Image (cartoon, rainbow, N blue to C red):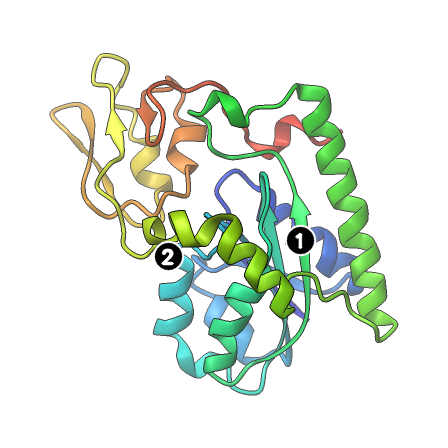
Amino acid sequence: MTGIYFSATGNSKYAAEIFCREFDKESTVLSIEDAKVKDAVKESDTIVFAYPVQFSTTPKFVRDFVINNAELWKDKKVFVIATMGLFSGDGSGQLGNLLKKYGAKIIGGLHLKMPDSVADEKALKRPLEENIKLVNNAKQKAIDAAKSLKEGHPTREGLSFINQMAGLFGQRLYFGHKTKNYTSKLKVDINKCIGCGKCGKICPMGNIKIENGKAVSKDKCTMCYRCINLCPNQAITLLGKRVVEQTEIKKYIE
C-alpha cells in the first residue's frame, strides 16, 4: 500500500499516515508534491489518497494532478479519504469519480471531520478543546477504517448516489464554481508582511513571490490556505478580512 495526500494544515497528511500505518506499518506515505510520488504510485497496487474537500469538491490542484498523470491510475485500487471542516456529502466520491475516468477501481471511502483550515472566517472556528476532540475522533475513525479494509469490508462513505445529491445540494451547486479555476483573490497586507518568504516556499503553485521586500500574490491560488495558516505575521487572507486563528494540526495532537 502507498498513501498519497495533498495537505495544507496537515489534516490530510495526518489522516493518510494514521490509516496507512494501521494497515501496514511499512507503507509509504508521500505528498503529491513529492518528486518520488509518481514512481511510488506506479509500484503499488493499492493507493490511499487523502485530500481536503473544498465546497464539497476537489481542489483544482488535486484535479490537475490526477488529470496530468492520467496514466498512473489504470487498474489501481484506490481508497479515498476526504477531510473537511464542516460537511461534504460525497467528498470521497468526487475524487473517486475522477480517478475512475482513468481506470482506477475505488475500493472505499472515508470522511473525517477535522479542524477547519479557513483561518480568516470567525464562523468556522471552534474552541481548542473541541478541535483536539475532533482530531482524536478522526484518528480513531481512520484506525477503525483501516482495520475494516484489512478484514475485507471497507467503509464506503461518500460513494453512493444519495451522498452525491447531498454534496450537490448541500454546497457544490452554490459554491462549486469557486474551485473550477485558480483564483487571484489572495490578499497580502503589506503593513504586516515582513518579507520572510515562507509563503512563497510553501505555496504548492509557486503563486507568491517576494518583490521589493514584500510578498506579492499572482493569479494561481488553489485556496489551500497553507500560506495563511503558516504566515508568521498573519499578513495573508483570502475569504475574510483578518486571520482569526491559524489551525495547523500540530496544535491539536496530544
**In the image, what residue occupies the spot 19% across and 45% down?**
219
Amino acid identity at mark 2: Phe
Give the mark toward the camera: 1 or 2: 1
The outermost residue toward the right is 151
User: Pointer 1: residues within 10 angstroms few (<14), some, or many (20+)?
Assistant: many
**In the image, what residue occupies the spot 64% across and 81% down?**
45
Q: From what the image shows, is residue 40 above or below residue 194?
A: below
The picture places residue 224, in percent across and down from the top left corner, at: 41, 43
The residue that mark 1 highlights is 111
The residue that mark 2 highlights is 61
The picture places residue 109, in percent across and down from the top left corner, at: 67, 64
* In this rendering, position of residue 215 left or right of residue 19: left
* In this rendering, position of residue 134 left or right of residue 52: right
User: Pointer 2: residues within 10 angstroms few (<14), some, or many (20+)?
Assistant: many
227 or 35: nearer the viewer: 227
74 or 60: nearer the viewer: 60
The picture places residue 71, in percent across and down from the top left corner, at: 42, 83
Q: From what the image shows, is residue 122 above or below residue 113?
A: above
Q: Quadrant of the N terminus?
A: bottom right
Amino acid identity at mark 1: His
Q: Tell me the element at label 1.
A: strand
Q: Determine the CA span between mark 1 and mark 2.
A: 20 Å
The outermost residue toward the left is 212
Decide if residue 77 is in sight here.
yes
Q: Tell me the element at label 2.
A: helix
In primary-sequence order, the first of circles 1 and 2 is 2
**In the image, what residue occupies the spot 25% across and 28% down?**
187
143 or 21: nearer the viewer: 143
